[in-house]
Image: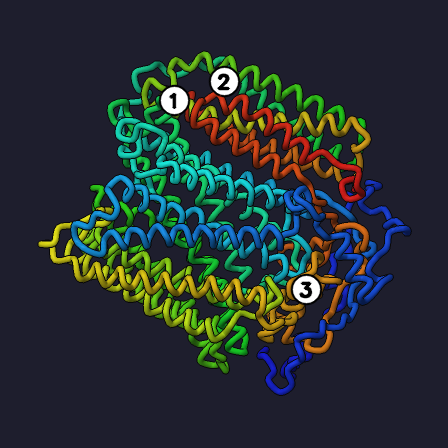
Amino acid sequence: MTRTLTPHDVDAVPEPTRLATGERGGLPGVRSAADAPPSPDELRDDQVDGLELSARLAKTWGTDKGLIGALSTVDHKIIGRRYIVTAIIFLFLGGLSAVAMRLQLAQPENELIGPDLYNQLFTMHGTTMMFLFGVPIGEAFAVYLVPLMVGTRNIAFPRLNAFSYYVYLFGGAMIWVAFMLNIGPDVGWFAYVPLSGPEFSPGKRADFWAQMITFTEVAGIAVAISVIVTVFKLRAPGMTLDRIPLFVWAELVNSFVIVFALPAVVTASAMLILDRLVGTHFFNPAEGGDALLYQHLFWFFGHPEVYIIFLPATGWVSAIVVTFARRQAFGYIALVLSLIATGFLSFGLWVHHMFTAGLPQLGASFFTASSMLIAIPNGIQIFCWIATLWDGRPIFRTPLLFIIGFFFIFVAGGLSGIMLASVPLDSQVHDTFFVVAHFHYVLIGGNVFPLLAAVYYWFPKFTGRMMSERIGIWHFGLAFIGFNVAFFPMHITGLMGMPRRVYTYLPEMGWGNLNLISTIGAVIFFASFVLFLYNLASSARRGPMAGPNPWDAGTLEWAAASPPLPQNFDRIPVVTNREPLWANRDSLPVVTGLSVDNREQIVSTITHGRADLRESTPEPSIWPFIAAVATAILFIGSMFTPWAVVWGSLPLAVALIGWFWPKMSTEDER
Amino acid sequence: MTAGSSHPRPSETPLSHRIVLNARHMPSYSYGHRSPIWWGTLSFAAAEGMGFVMVVGAYFYLVFINGNWPLSAPPPDLLWSSLFTVLMLASIWPNQMAKRDGEREDLSRSRRDLVIMSLIGLALLGIRVLELGTLHVRWDQNAYGSILWLLLGLHTLHLATDLGDTIVLTVLMFTRHGHGKRFSDVGDNAFYWYFVVASWPPIYVIIYWFPRWW
């Protein structure tokens, strides 16, 4: 009994009884239509093979041409691609507003931008980066990659996913159009009351902010639920919990954090808009309300938000480190448990954003402790990644370079975070550039650098072409230098007392030189993004062809073509290892028996990943788009009259009925 | 498992397939937690439940800040709200029948159950309208009125959406679409109704009884 296991034993395909449940669909004693034998007229993938199978499946799972086809698509890759491109456009818009602010601050008493526009700029910058880029970018990658990585053909609830994209797009477009019309919000990205309340912010500016929250949070929760159910129920047979790729684990934990955190900010923004529009008194102390209630609700969301931005990035880091270290992740279990611990702890830190709001001392001490506690799981992750690289044979291509940059920048941001967790220090530097420096180290280090790595890494999968490695190295160099030159001096400007959100300062304050250095850094950082954009555009057209697996990576998305065909996989893979493509170098174990003419996919069990059902998944439909338009009419109309909630719900109801009503196709009839 | 370095496979060729399992005779749908929709419903209930928790948290925060409660208004009347509560709890029985008859794929009974559930939903909505008239406070009177109306409004929104959902499904079951996987939808609709029911008793106690005890 002491024979050591050979790799062959570990990766052997288990007997079918361990890969499938073999249970009936109907309940005991019920003659259920679920268990009816499949129609013999319907072609199944055990009857065709090779190119014919590919072509037929591509037709079944494809998206129609033309505008209606494009707006009806439910293909997670098309929606995911749109989500990624839209989020990156918002990243650029947010970045441009930051460059404008840096130019204004380059010298004392600069007159480039006035106070009113400056207020709108910092509000748009923060709002865009947090709500229109930070949350959606992680979900966007999940929409594209999670179904591929778990070995299925489409995301769960693909129409909900399409609806979510349009709602997000409309919400983002709305607030930017408002900004272009000089009615952009000007109350900061967290829109504190009483400043954002009816008394101090008359007009529509704060309403646009509050309603943008409603749009993006509805979209965010919808995607999170699609991702959770995809990971729970659509995994390839054999993908037990401990074989789920780390990226997918990160997106799963992230989705849970989203489901539990976003309702808080929806509540906060709904109360704010009710105070502003229908005269409620939630935040009005004269009538029994309280301004700090807003801060509690906002930060109960706002702190998990930081981890909503960071958790997907840990997934990108894990995927890239493993591929380029050429070995499995060191400490897989520790990494997964760290993700889960981070997810839980992220809900226990919110008050550290409110240390200067005059809270009881015991409460402040508790939140100091919990803020320091969360450094532990994050530290464990960093050590696991370093160990993976240490023990592997790392290949330093552009994606890995950005990950190395992430290590340095994020750890530096973490260190200033530990400092800020202590109440006396926080009280001194609260609302200064020290805090600005800290959270840009954490957020750009913790999200943007891994994102750039992820774009270089998965670009071949998305487009079928490689990005230029030479430009990539220049891009990394400029970004790393530009970022540090821009943000490191802010620690010092902050310690010297320069507050956030001032549109200018006097020369005798002595902040001029440091601000000029920061602006120079910002311009270099900006140049790195211009280079990035050029690399994207030129590589998409002329880059060398990639093939399915250019990095010789181990996870399932690299088993699909580059770019993947509409069906993702011609047959659903069977998983025997955490890195299925490293375990099966010659041939891929697969499941057959699914329909070729209809959209069928495997539904499996949550823990053991046993195949349970062959369920059909929705066909394309224009109704999610129409429902999103109706939702936009309702949300925007309600800023002008509360009755829009009543009459606006009618077209929405019609759209939802159209969405759910079965069509003539076979899929809906079964 | 590490990446082999000796002879990397040319990445242009797709992997050949080795068939190890056949799904041809697997069922095409099922009930409860075996169905993805059930998990979707559960997740939405979790997100919306979190919304209720937030508003309830805000309610007690305002109680704590103000000390006296309710603010310059008598507590809301008990008649309609208690009737609402009784009918809500009673609806568990026909709801459970709808779920069971759906699982048995019994079309005529499922239709009957869904009609009953639609009528109960309409009755509840009617009682809710009467209930709103006996709150003794408006949303724009003070923070107490604001949070009371928000809590009740949030629950009413859930009641109305589930009612709409139930009516559409009822009509659907009377058309030629009423077979197969739609029976699983009947179960999931009943499952969501349990969430609407379960979220009510705490809100009832908070809105109607807590101000009397405080």
Between label 3 and label 2, give the one nearer the viewer: 3
Marked residue chain, label 3: A
Give the Cα separation between the discs numbered 1 and 3: 55 Å
Marked residue chain, label 1: A
Q: Is there a contact, CB below 8 Å, between mark 1 and mark 3?
A: no
- The amino acid type found where label 1 is placed reads Val
Tell me what residue is drawn at x 55 percent, y 55 percent: A142
- Residue A534 place in picture, x, y as percent: 48, 64
Residue holding disc 2: B81
Q: Establish whether labels 1 and 3 are both on one chain.
A: yes
- Looking at marks 1 and 3 on the same chain, the residue that comes earlier in the sequence is marked by 3
Quick one: quadrant of the N terminus of chain A?
A: bottom right
Q: How many marks?
A: 3
- Residue A480 place in picture, x, y as percent: 35, 69
Residue holding disc 1: A278
The secondary element bearing badge 1 is classed as loop
Q: Residues within 10 Å of mark 2 (few under 14, many from 20)?
A: many
Give the Cα separation between the discs numbered 3 and 2: 51 Å
Q: Quadrant of residue A490?
A: bottom left
